[in-house]
Structure formats: structure tokens, C-alpha cells
């Protein structure tokens, strides 16, 4: 394929609104974490490694073909408690059959004052079949992270982006699909629309801190 055509196709195939809004929020949140030992859950080739201040960076995945540092299921991780300063889990929670247990396990693995940065979907087509189990609301995420402190649940996108995402995922005949290609670069522009509160987000980023237990008064 000629180089000019390859570059043109790369410009046309913009990421989805879900991916763009997630990346924008991670670029805000991840540089703020304290440098330390980081665990990237389900991170594959660790695309966000450069965004995270770290002294050591480990990956965890259930798929051995991705060559993770820790190959296991997040529901039960054979690793020392209170080991990691930061846990990053992007687009993983909806693929876990027991998200409550997975969040408990991340809580166990974090040091006191450690931070979990997690993202998940609310409006999104089914993906990762057959292991796509859940969609989450802000209230549901706050409930799951009840053991943490300083929990932020940040919406990604809005009603306009939800409509755009679903429209661009429609299964249409190839001829019609080709007619829509010139419109796909608009995704980047639409993805810049951000609101603080929305009833129709694409998903959420959760930033939650594990505080040390409060000592009980001696009697």
C-alpha cells in the first residue's frame, strides 16, 4: 500500500468516542499518582505505562500469550498484600464475573495510601464475548469501592457521544459504510465535548485511595 494512502487511512480510522474520552481523562489523572510500584491489570502491552509515574511497573493478565509479569485471574491473585502503590485497571471490570471480589482483591494488594485508577463502561456495545458481564452506574461503582476513601467517579462523555458511539457501531452494508468514512474524523471533535454531570455517560473513571485503618482508642 502506498505511504500516502496508508497515512490517509490512519487519519480516517479515528478511535471511538469511548477510547478518546478515556485517554483524555487518564492523561489528567495518571500523572498525579505518587511514583512507586504499579500494577497494570489487563493492560496487554501496557499502553499507559508512560503516563504513570513509577519505580517498577508490573502487568497482570489471565492470557499467557500477552506475557504478563503476573499471569492469573484478578479474582484471586497469588501476591503479597499491601505491595503496590498504584493499581491501574482499564476496561476490565465489565469482563469480571465477580466484580466485588476483584475490587476487594485490588484493595488487598494496595499499600496504605495507595491509589486505584479504574475505568469501565456504562453505554457500549457488547464486546469481548463470551466474557462481557456487566455495565456500571456511578452509584454501583461507589458501592463497589465502599472500602476505599476519597473515591472520585468521573463520567466519560455525554448524551451526544453516546448517540454517536452507537450510530458508528451499527452493522450496515459495506457500500453505506464507505459513505460514512469521511465523517469519522468528526469523532475527535465530538469527543472534546465534556460535561460534569450526565445521565448518559459512555463510562466512568474511578480514582480511589486506600487509607490506613483508623486506630481505635485504648481503654
Image: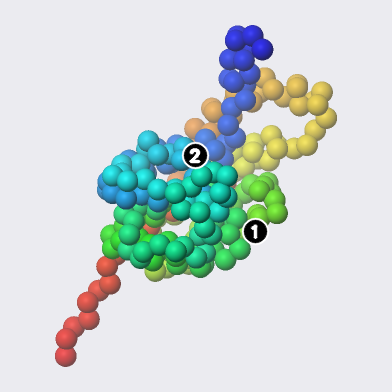
- The 10 Å Cα crowd at callout 2, few under 14, some 14 to 19, many 20 or more, is few
Q: Is residue 67 left or right of residue 51?
A: right
Q: Label 2 near label 1: C-beta < 8 Å?
A: no
Among the 4 quarters of the image, the one containing residue 116? bottom left
Q: Residue at x 82, y 23 (%)?
A: 175
Q: What percent of the width, then of the height, locates residue 203?
A: 54, 49
Nearer-the-camera pick, 24 or 193: 24
Nearer-the-camera pick, 62 or 110: 62
Say which residue label 2 marks: 45
Q: What percent of the width, then of the height, locates residue 158?
A: 55, 43
Say which residue label 1 marks: 133
User: Can residue 33 be seen by looking at this rendering?
Assistant: no
- The 10 Å Cα crowd at callout 1, few under 14, some 14 to 19, many 20 or more, is some
Q: Which mark is residue 78?
A: none
Q: What percent of the width, then of the height, locates residue 102?
A: 50, 63
User: Can residue 147 be seen by looking at this rendering?
Assistant: yes
Check the image and report above or below for 203 versus 104: above
Q: Residue at x 78, y 37 (%)?
A: 171
Amino acid at each position: 500500500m502506498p505511504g500516502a494512502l496508508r497515512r490517509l487511512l490512519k487519519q480516517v480510522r479515528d478511535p471511538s468516542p469511548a477510547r478518546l474520552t478515556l485517554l483524555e481523562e487518564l492523561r489528567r489523572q495518571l500523572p498525579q499518582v505518587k511514583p512507586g510500584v504499579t500494577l497494570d491489570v489487563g493492560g496487554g502491552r501496557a499502553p499507559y505505562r508512560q503516563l504513570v509515574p513509577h519505580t517498577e511497573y508490573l502487568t497482570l493478565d489471565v492470557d499467557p500469550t500477552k506475557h504478563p509479569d503476573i499471569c492469573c485471574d484478578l479474582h484471586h491473585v497469588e501476591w503479597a498484600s499491601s505491595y503496590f502503590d498504584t493499581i491501574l485497571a482499564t476496561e476490565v471490570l465489565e469482563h469480571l464475573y465477580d466484580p466485588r471480589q476483584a475490587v476487594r482483591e485490588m484493595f488487598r494488594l494496595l499499600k496504605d495510601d495507595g491509589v486505584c485508577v479504574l475505568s469501565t463502561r456504562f453505554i457500549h456495545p457488547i464486546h469481548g464475548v463470551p466474557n462481557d458481564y456487566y455495565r456500571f452506574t456511578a452509584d454501583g461503582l461507589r458501592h463497589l469501592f465502599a472500602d476505599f476513601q476519597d473515591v472520585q467517579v468521573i463520567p466519560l462523555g455525554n448524551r451526544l457521544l453516546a448517540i454517536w458511539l452507537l450510530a458508528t457501531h451499527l452493522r450496515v452494508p459495506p457500500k453505506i459504510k464507505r459513505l460514512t468514512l469521511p465523517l469519522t474524523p468528526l469523532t475527535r471533535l465530538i469527543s472534546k465535548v465534556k460535561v460534569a454531570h450526565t445521565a448518559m455517560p459512555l463510562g466512568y473513571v474511578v480514582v480511589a485511595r486506600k487509607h490506613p485503618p483508623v486506630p481505635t482508642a485504648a481503654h
